[in-house]
Structures are given as C-alpha cells and as structure tokens.
Image (cartoon, rainbow, N blue to C red):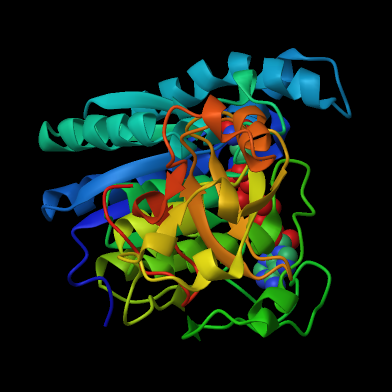
Amino acid sequence: MLLTDNNRVVIKVGSALIAPGNEGCSPKYLSNIANFITQYRQQGKQVILVSSGSVAAGRKWFNEDKPSKRMKKAMAAAGQTDMMAIWDRLLDMPLAQILLTHADLCNRERYISIKETIESLLANGVIPVVNENDTITSEELKVGDNDNLAAMTAAAINADTLIICTDVDGLYDKNPHTHNDAKLLSTIESITPEIYSMAGGAISSTGTGGMQTKIEAAEKAADHGIDTLIINGFKAASFEQLLKNNNPGTHFLSIPEPLAPAAHWMTHTVRERGELVVSDSFATANASDDESVLTSDNILEVKGQFSVGDTVLLTTDDGTHVAKAQTNYSSCLLNYIAQDQEDTAPEDQYITKNNAIISTEHLTVLENV
Ligand SMILES: Nc1ncnc2c1ncn2[C@@H]1O[C@H](COP(=O)(O)OP(=O)(O)O)[C@@H](O)[C@H]1O
Ligand SMILES: N[C@@H](CCC(=O)OP(=O)(O)O)C(=O)O
C-alpha cells in the first residue's frame, strides 16, 4: 500500500508527455494526468504541478533542427504560454504560473517568498504550475532540469510525495531503450552509488537529464522525508493504479530520519559559490566555544569570488568539509581580513556557526539560517 497519507503531492510532467513528436502541445497524454489531478483533488489532496515542455512546445515556431542554448531560451519563452494554455484547457480549476531559477531558490528571502506564495495558492484551491524560467537563466543561475526543480519545490513546501511522470515505466537496472533485457525495479530502499550507476542520460531530443536527474531528485526528496514515484505518464493504467494507492512504477522510500528543513535547504538546494579554508580549531570547536567565532585568525584562505549572502563551503587545510555557511562579507573583504587587515572589518565576527549548516559531524546544526 502506498500514498495513503499522501496529502500534498508534487507531480512532475516531462516534455515528451506535453509535446510528443516535437509538434507542439498535445492533450494526447495530458488528459489522463489532468483527470488524475482532478480525482486526487476530489479526495482532498493538494497538488502542485511541475511542468516541463516550454522548449518542446515552442520548437515548432523555429526552423532549427539542433537549436543552440540561446535559441532554446527563445523557444521556452514562446512555448511557455502554450504549455500553460493546454493545462488551463484540461484542468477545470484555477492555475498559477510560477517561473523559478536556481538563484531564486538559493536566496533565503526569495525562497521563503516562494514557499509563502505556494501556500497561499494551495489554501485558496489554486494549482501552482512551476517551471524553470529558462529565458533568463545562465549556466550559473539555473537548476538545469525539472526533476531536481520538482524535488526542491517538494522540499520547500513539505510535500508528502513526489510523482515523476516520464516516458518509461520507472527505473530499470539499465536503460530499457538500449537494453532489451533491462529489468524494472519496483522499490528502492536506499539510494546508493550502485543505483546511480544504473542510470543513463536522456536519449530523446526533448528530455533533459534522463534517469540520472530523477535519482538525484529522489535522493533530495528522500532526505526530506518525501517518497518518490517514477511512473509511465503515457499509460492511463499508471494513474488508475495510483488512485488505488498502488505503485505502478518505481517507488523510492524516504529515509527514516530526514534532515531538518534548514539543513536540507543548505545541503540539497543551495550551491556554494566559494570556499573558506578554516583552522582545525574552528572546525572542531563546539558552537558555544569562543573558537566557534570565525575571525581573521582562523580563516586560512578565501577561494573564489562571492558576495554578501552567498553560500560558501568551509573546509580544513586537508580538504575536509566542515560546513556550509551564508557569508556576511564578500570574498573581497574576507580576503583583506584574512591577510590580517582586521581594522577594516566593522566587527570581529565575520561568519559564525550560528549561520553555519552542516554536513559533517564536526559542527552542530543551528537554526534560523
Ligand atoms: N536505468 C534507466 N531506466 C529507465 N530509463 C533510463 C535509464 N537510463 C536512462 N534512461 C532514459 O531516461 C529517459 C527518461 O528521461 P528523460 O528523457 O529526461 O524524460 P523526461 O522528459 O520525462 O524527464 C528514458 O526514456 C530512458 O531513455
Ligand atoms: N524547463 C524546460 C524543461 C527541462 C526539463 O527538465 O525537461 P524534462 O527532462 O522533459 O523534464 C522546459 O520547460 O522546456
């Protein structure tokens, strides 16, 4: 039995389901998904849709066989309205468009604003339809695939389940499109390197990331206490099974002791933009010790360029990861400070463990990051 306590669900729909055959949006597969969403909502469940397909939908207006990254952004801009329009036609309920970049999710203020907006939409019966804002993203700013975006969204709003609708039945032990003897895996209890080694990339011209990004998404979700299902969105039977609380594809179980929300955000959403090499005494100090305040004495090196509010990785000289932290100072100022120019710093406290969120046992997770 599955999905019984499944009250808040993020459903991610891949491009091949939205615009099959690169001929623009089609209701061919989406009507099953729309019916499923309608029935789920009638059962009192809240649904958040993460919909790919803007590039695939917009492609028909461009005379490009192999579009460049730049051209794909234009296709996304053109196709996004079509993609929203088809959902609007198939779902007899109000929809809200939410376009995000990774930079939005990494910024604490914007992250909280995204959460609050989605909560307000759900409280008023409006379905949020999330996609990456491909038009304005650069390599640095983007999540890059909607599987990971869906997992980050699911974590942000404390969903119970992430359902990834794709063009195969679930995760196989090898790519079923290239191996006739591939076997479908029905339950994954723990996401190990062996599981990752089974995944290949996308081979279709519309998909991004293949199974690799779906496993990454399942891992992000699992660490937040969220189960993930990968199902075949082409088949009406997948949705009939889901409505009966059965697993129609691959079910990834969440971990028994999920990370605290702030630690999860730091670990799985935020990307570090630089590195501070810190002294061993800082790395091993308890949060209450004097040593736990990061001063010019225990910053050994500043690597990379970052601004106030960016996340940095704290490491020791031998490369051990100590923590991730949001910095209150730019790399420029910290570089100056680390070179013993303390008098230029407004205070003798540059980054404290109060702002540090942790991936190792050396430090304790502290709140309000
Ligand atoms: N081990 C595997 N099991 C299933 N599919 C796999 C595997 N390895 C690679 N794939 C590929 O992943 C594809 C699904 O990912 P993708 O094309 O990105 O779809 P979507 O657009 O739904 O995100 C499948 O069509 C398949 O070619
Ligand atoms: N944001 C892109 C989709 C990116 C993506 O991950 O696509 P897919 O692998 O089909 O889910 C778009 O709307 O075209």
As displayed, is residue 218 above or below residue 346? below
Compared across the picture, whether 152 is left or right of 191 comes to left
As displayed, is residue 119 above or below residue 220? above
Q: Residue at x 74, y 72 (%)?
A: 176
Q: Residue at x 27, y 55 (%)?
A: 367
Q: Quadrant of ligand 2?
A: top right
* Foreground pick, 113 / 64: 113
Q: Which quadrant of the figure has residue 9? A: bottom left
Classify the position of the N terminus by image quarter: bottom left
Percent position of residue 338, x then y: 65, 42
As displayed, is residue 96 above or below residue 248? above
Q: Which quadrant of the figure has residue 221? A: bottom left
Compared across the picture, whether 266 is left or right of 354 comes to right
The reply to whether residue 101 is in sight is no
Percent position of residue 91, x then y: 30, 33
Compared across the picture, whether 3 is left or right of 191 comes to left
Q: Residue at x 51, y 48 (%)?
A: 295
* Foreground pick, 252 / 298: 298
* Foreground pick, 239 / 206: 206
Q: Which quadrant of the figure has residue 320? A: bottom right
As displayed, is residue 157 above or below residue 191? above
The reply to whether residue 301 is in sight is yes
Percent position of residue 359, x then y: 49, 68
Total residue callouts: 0
Q: Residue at x 50, y 45 (%)?
A: 149
Percent position of residue 110, x then y: 37, 29
* Foreground pick, 148 / 330: 330
